Amino acid sequence: PPFPILLVGPVQKGFGRGGKQLGCPTANLPDESITPISTVAKTGVYYGYAQIIPPKDRDTQLRPEDIKVLPMVMSLGWNPFYKNKQLTAEIHILHDFQSDFYGLELRAVVLGYIRPELDYTSREALIDDINTDKRVALNSLDRSGYQAFARDAHFDLQ
Ligand code: ADP
Ligand code: MG
C-alpha cells in the first residue's frame, strides 16, 4: 500500500469489545473516514502517528500533552457485528489520556504494516501481541525518516 495514508474523522462510539478492559482503548473512525485505507490495504495491524484536534467552540478536558502528534497502532479488520461485511479501523494512541474524546476530530498518518490479524485462543496471548505491536511501532517511528511524518501538514502544528 502507498504509505503514508492519511485518515481523518470524528471519533465514534464502538461496541466496547474489550478495548479498555485489555488496557488498550481503541478510537473508532466512521466508515467514510477509512476509505483511504480500506480500498488499498489488507487487514491487520499498522503503526503511525495520530492527533486529537480540540474543538474551537467549546472547552474539553484535554491537556496540552493530549493534543500533540502521538505514536499509534491501528487495527484494520472485519467487524463481526456486521457479519464481517464491514471493515473497521481502530486506533490505539500510545499515550495516557485522562479523559475520553468521543466526537472529537482524529487525524492519523499510517506509515507501515506490523502483522496480519490473528485469532487468539487466550486473552494473555492477545495482550502479549498488543504489547509487541506497541514496541514495534515505537522502534519503527524512532527511525529519523519516520519522525518527519509527525510534522506532516495533515496535522495541526503550533
Ligand atoms: P469503543 O468500543 O467505544 O471504541 P474502547 O474501549 O475501545 O471503546 O475505548 C475507546 C475510547 O477510549 C476512545 O474513543 C477514546 O475516547 C478513549 N481513549 C482513552 N485513551 C485512549 C487511547 N490511548 N487511545 C485511543 N482511545 C482512547
Ligand atoms: Mg474501540
Image (cartoon, rainbow, N blue to C red):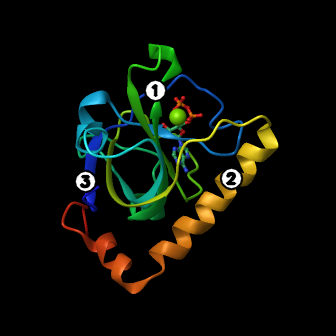
**In terms of depth relative to the viewer, which is nearer, 121 or 18?**
121
Report the Cα–Cα distance between label 3 and label 2. 25 Å
Task: Identify which residue is drawn at 48% across, 24% down.
Answer: 79
The answer to whether the residue bearing label 3 lies less than 8 angstroms from the nearest atom of ligand 1 is no
In the rendered structure, the answer to whether residue 45 lies left or right of residue 153 reads: right
Q: Amino acid at mark 3?
A: Leu
Q: Residues within 10 Å of mark 1 (few under 14, many from 20)?
A: some
Query: Residue 56 bears which disc, if any?
Result: none
Q: Secondary structure at mark 3?
A: strand
Give whichever of discs 1 and 3 has the lower sequence position.
3
Q: Residues within 10 Å of mark 3 (few under 14, many from 20)?
A: many
**In terms of depth relative to the viewer, which is nearer, 120 or 91?**
120
Rendered location of residue 146, percent (x, y): 36, 76
Q: Secondary structure at mark 1?
A: loop
Q: Is residue 155 above or below residue 90?
A: below
Kindly report which numbered mark, 3 or 2, lies closer to the viewer in this rendering.
2
The residue tagged 3 is: 6
Q: Residue furthest left?
A: 153
The residue tagged 1 is: 13
Q: Amino acid at mark 1?
A: Lys
Rendered location of residue 144, percent (x, y): 39, 85
Q: Is residue 99 above or below residue 155?
A: above
Report the Cα–Cα distance between label 2 and label 1. 24 Å
Task: Identify which residue is drawn at 33% across, 46% down.
Answer: 41
Query: Residue 129 bears which disc, if any?
Result: 2
Report the Cα–Cα distance between label 1 and label 3. 21 Å
Kindly report which numbered mark, 2 or 1, lies closer to the viewer in this rendering.
2
The answer to whether the residue bearing label 1 lies less than 8 angstroms from the nearest atom of ligand 1 is yes
Location of residue 94 (image quadrant): bottom right
